[in-house]
Amino acid sequence: MVWPEFVPYGLQILALLLEVSPREAVSANFGPLLASLLSPTMWETRGNVPACVRLLSASIPLAAADIVAENKLEQVLGIFERLIQSKKLNLYAFDVLDAIVRAFQPWVPRGDGRVRRD
């Protein structure tokens, strides 16, 4: 039996564990956690949003390659869009955006029309 009022605390503990663990120490069990975190049902309860944002922000740098390979970047950007549209939650949207910008290096255009990665 899961008590919904304790879900944010569990998410915050998971986020803290991800933040302090070395990059190589993240297990294969992380994939299903990320998939459930990206589901819209996790974000429906307003009380879950701060904890979900913290966990997502901790997850993005560790799973950047998987997010791109599995085409989940659109889901992450969808969460950002949903948060930015809410006046009460738009502050959390910038935490997600910050994690995205830090995790994915930008493609920089060169003078000859090609792009390079910095």
Image: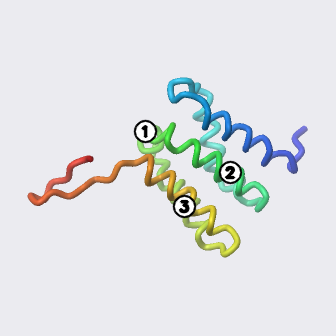
In the image: residue 52, left or right of residue 70: right
For label 3, the SS is: helix
Task: Determine whether label 1 and label 3 are within 8 Å by CB.
Answer: no
* Residue identifier under label 2: 52
Q: Secondary structure at mark 1?
A: helix
Point out the tag, 1 or 3, that comes first from the N-terminus: 1
Instruction: Name the one closer to the observer, 42 or 60.
Output: 60
Q: Which mark is residue 112?
A: none
Q: Badge 3: few (under 14), some or many (20 or more) residues near its Cα, within 10 Å?
A: some
**Mark 2: amino acid:** Cys
Q: Amino acid at mark 1?
A: Ala
C-alpha gap between disc 2 and disc 1: 20 Å
In front: label 3 or label 2: 2
Quadrant where the N terminus is found in the figure:
top right
Location of residue 8 with respect to 111 vertically, above or below:
above
Residue 25 percent across, percent down from the top left: 56, 24
Asked which quadrant contains residue 114, the reply is: bottom left
Residue 13 lies, with reference to residue 102, above or below; the image says: above
Residue where numbered disc 1 is placed: 65
Residue at the image point whose x is 26% and y is 47% from the top: 118
Numbered badge on residue 78: 3
Element under disc 2: helix
Instruction: Give the quarter of the image for residue 65.
Output: top left
Q: CA distance from mark 1 to mark 3?
A: 18 Å
C-alpha span from label 3 to label 2: 14 Å
